[in-house]
Image (spheres, grey):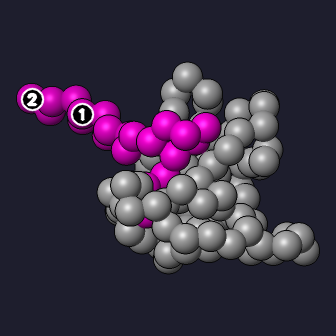
Amino acid sequence: MKPRVGQTLTSPVDSTTVIVVRAPDSDISLTCAGVEMVDPKAKTDQPNGTADPNQMGGTVIGKRYADEALGLELLCTKPGKGTLAVNGEPVPMKQSKPLPASD
């Protein structure tokens, strides 16, 4: 899959929904709970499968998940129980930047 900025992706095995904030130029395998995420607006066959119990770390609404090396950033708009992964590696939650001190 080659994600596009602004694209909404959902998990077919749980309630996780994300929006692509930054997208790499190459094809990637983006999964949630071990099953490929899908574009709900696409007219293609939806993948089916079962959630991998080893990939059930969960997602948090409003948090960003990013793989800086690939240039991928996702915003979670609906939480779920599955772990987001790209090319088989979990996507870490992006840490917020500390605000400057106001004296």
Task: Place residue 23 in its image quadrant.
Answer: top right
61 w.r.t. 98: above or below: below
| Residue 90 percent across, percent down from the top left | 45, 42
Q: Main secondary structure of the magenta part?
A: loop
Residue at x-position 89% and y-position 70% = 44
The residue at the far top in this view is 69
| Residue denoted by label 1 | 98
Marked residue nearer the N-terminal end (1 or 2): 1
Say which amino acid is labelled 2: Asp
Task: Tell whether 59 sits left or right of 66.
Answer: left
- Can residue 50 be seen in this snapshot? yes
Q: Are marks 1 and 2 in contact (CB under 8 Å)?
A: no
| Residue 5 percent across, percent down from the top left | 72, 48
Any magenta on residue 10? no
The residue at the far right in this view is 43
Residue at x-position 62% and y-position 70% = 49
2 w.r.t. 97: above or below: below
The answer to which of 84 and 33 lies nearer the viewer is: 33
31 w.r.t. 9: above or below: above
Magenta range is: 82-103
Kind of element beneath mark 1 = loop
| Residue 77 percent across, percent down from the top left | 50, 68
| Residue denoted by label 2 | 103
Kind of element beneath mark 2 = loop
Q: Alpha carbon of mark 1 to alpha carbon of mark 2: how far? A: 15 Å
Say which amino acid is labelled 1: Pro
51 w.r.t. 96: above or below: below
Labelled disc at residue 40 = none
Task: Place residue 54 in its image quadrant.
Answer: bottom left
Q: Closer to the camera: disc 1 or disc 2?
A: 1
The answer to which of 90 and 50 lies nearer the viewer is: 50
Mark 2 Cα shell of 10 Å, populated few (<14), some (14-19), many (≥20): few
